[in-house]
Image (tube, rainbow, N blue to C red):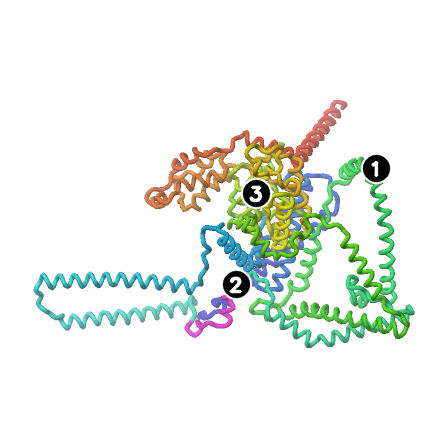
Amino acid sequence: MIVKPNSFWDTPDGNLLFSNSTYNKVWADAQKDLDIQLQREREEFVQPEKDRVKVFEMLATSYIKYVQICCKLETAHDQLIHRQKRRAIRQVLDGVIGRILEIKKEMVELENSEFNYIDNILEDLKLLPQDIEVPIPRYFIKEKLEVLQQREKILDQILLNAGLQTQKYVQAITFEEAIKVIQVAERARQGRRRVAFMKQIYLEEKRERQTKLQIPMGPNPDDAATCIQKVCRGYVQRKKTEKMREEEMIFLGMSLPPHLKAVSVSQMHAGQVNALQGEVQEREEEVFIKDTLREMEGLNIKETLQDQIGQCFIECRHIIGKFPDYPTEEAGGSMAILSEKTPEQVASELAAKKEMALQKKAQKGEKEKEKEKGKENMKGKKTQKTGKKEEEEGWKMAPSNFLSIMEEGNSQYKAVWQNRDEGWDFLQDHDPELIKEEKREEVEEEIRVQVDELMQQKLENLRLAVDGEESNKRNKGRKSEKKKKMTTRKKIPEMEQDLTPDRTIDSLYRELVEEGLLIKAKTVNLSDYVGEYSYLGTTLRQVDIEPMPSLADVRQLIALYGILPLGSQTVHERAPLVKALLLAGPAGVGKKMLVHAICTETGANLFNLSASNIAGKYPGENGLQMMLHMVLKVAKQLQPSVIWIGDTEKIFLKAVPKGEEAMNPKRLVKILPKFLKALKAQDRVLLVGTTNRPFDANLKPFCKVYQKIIPIPRPDYASRFVLWKHIILQNGGAITNLLNISCLAKVSDGFTQGHIVQVVQAVLSELRLLQMTRKPLRTAEFMASLARENPVYKEEEETFKAWYAKTPLGKARIKALADREESGKGKTKGGNKGKGKK
């Protein structure tokens, strides 16, 4: 049996369908795992648990499972091009990310530490540390790629005009233009070479004619004929060989026959797959479907709604004896009337709502008075009661904001996508029927608003004609005016007042760029922050030794607290809110790099409010307030945004050192808490501070501003081993047997990532890279450069540890460890006493 060469799987569309089926399976596996995990949560997390070790194992296992589900969902969301599928996956993906953040918060509160070590659980599950690396969804950037590129062009143009950028922005050219430029240059080079070659031949011939007397002798005709025959036969044979080779490849199915090589519509669609991936946009077809539904079904929907509402009016009049009040837009309008209830129930509900509103107003004043009295009496009793309850009842999982989202997405998958027949959907782009259902709801909502206006007028006319009642519009208007006046009287916080109502966002953006407050972030990915996982964390904690956090743990915390909430609006609004983040560690550990990585991964704007950067800008209290107002306004409007304060300890110094009085580093100390208070859950704005000397700052206000503190230590042996290898290869070096990476990692104990980068760049100069082929790198070459760097000494590291122990989380950790020791001693004493009595 001969296999046909034009098999379906050899076509681009065949590959497209095959890839879609693969990623559909990945999605199905993720939903299956999610269903199991949700069932497990309903069973395990409902009942209180006293054993803290068992609680941590439950939380850590759930964390690992959710991370694995998140990886699968992110892959399926990125690779599938079906718009409705991507929308369904996106909902569940946001829910899973939010649940990961909630579980992480519970783990931190349980252990009183930002760093949780789960290597023993990974070993039980037979997983690698790479399997629990939190994925960063690619849709953070892909969905707004055009906006980010346009914003980058505008930023470059502003910097160029202001003289703040030396390098001119290089405009990208198309592929065809690039080929044309290369062709012109190559043809010019060939032309010059040919002219030089022909000139050389001409001069040689001229020289020969002058020096020798040549006798003109013609070639032999037989030799000429043989030469021509050789050329012709060679040409014919090459053509035959090429044809045979082509036929053989077609026969084997390695290439397509000529009649199938023409570009078809399906092949053009397959070529656009990469462009379609990751784009969620409204197409002309959706608008066309909506317009068609409005034209075809709009009149019927309008008439049906009017008939149903009119029937409700008549029934209410017949049963109650009067026409009901028309529900307001807040109550749902005609949706409240058309709910599956009798007219009596609708009228009674509307009346009950009015009574409840009046009762609530009356009860508010009484409750406030009771609360004030109760607060004073309960201050001392609260701590004792909560402590006793926790001991008696045990740990219980806090209510989640994301379980409902995941359950809704899971049920939608089972109802719509799990057993759906998609044999007809060859392109796997979108489903018109699902679009119709979505657009029909939008059309009904638009028509319902129009019908509400008509039916309100009709209801007033009926009342006037039948009951002789006047409309209450005027009274309502007066009430609304009173409400407006009351709202205007309320005081607006200082940071929320609009000090620039007559200015556009573009003008504010331009001013901040020109003043150097809004800067261009470097393109750095979080994966570039190289570091190894800590494999002995659990073992050391079991022996009551607090391990130093690894660089992989720091990378994970940046992803959890910085990147994931900033990238998704849903996650930021519902997840545990982190407004401020502090990165504390010695110089060279990569704090600034992590700030730029947050901006790169989320497409965030970067504002620099370091004391050295704002010195002399916007002087005075009014100027400072205006500056922060502009930053906050632009950051909220063009969110996500990152506000970076370098050397942030200078803001909270106890006393300003000599020589820095002119810089006035403590300008922000009073206004910074108000600035953070103005940030709400819907504002994707993150304050990130970096510091080399946190122990110089006043601790109380410092810890009040920065909600999360991430200490970044110098790299350990495993991280240094990976770093040396990565940085040498990144700078063009080659690793051979003559280069002992293990020795370099051992010798560089105490040095940071910045030191290693400087050493490698100093050794691998341009001249040394040219000598790499004949003179491989040796270990001794890096020693001299490494000896010139100043390492992080043990005393400095101990100072950082002592400072972190004074922070709120550090104190809580020390207290928890002390309580466990006391309880352990108590148990051993009780056991010994019992033995003595026996």
Foreground of the two, 88 or 671 = 671
Q: Are marks 2 and 3 in contact (CB under 8 Å)?
A: no
Residue 275's mark?
Answer: 2
Which residue is situated farthest in the top direction here?
A: 836
Q: Is 229 placed above or below 492 here?
A: below
N-terminal of the two: label 1 or label 2?
2
Describe the element under mark 1 as helix, strand or loop: helix
The part of the chain drawn in magenta is 257-273
Residue that carries the numbered disc 3 in the rendered image: 616
Foreground of the two, 833 or 109 = 109
Q: How far apart are marks 3 and 1 (CA)?
A: 50 Å
Residue 803: give x, y in percent of width and height: 61, 33
N-terminal of the two: label 3 or label 1?
1
Q: Quadrant of the N terminus?
A: bottom left
Describe the element under mark 3 as helix, strand or loop: loop
Q: Quadrant of the C terminus?
A: top right
Q: How far apart are marks 1 and 2 (CA)?
A: 65 Å
Q: Is the magenta stretch mostly helix, strand or loop?
A: helix
N-terminal of the two: label 2 or label 3?
2
Residue 377's mark?
Answer: 1
Residue 381 seen by the camera: yes
* Mark 3 crowdedness (10 Å alpha carbons): few <14, some 14-19, many ≥20: few
Residue 237: give x, y in percent of width and height: 28, 70
Foreground of the two, 184 or 344 = 184
**Residue at the location (62% across, 59% down)?**
89
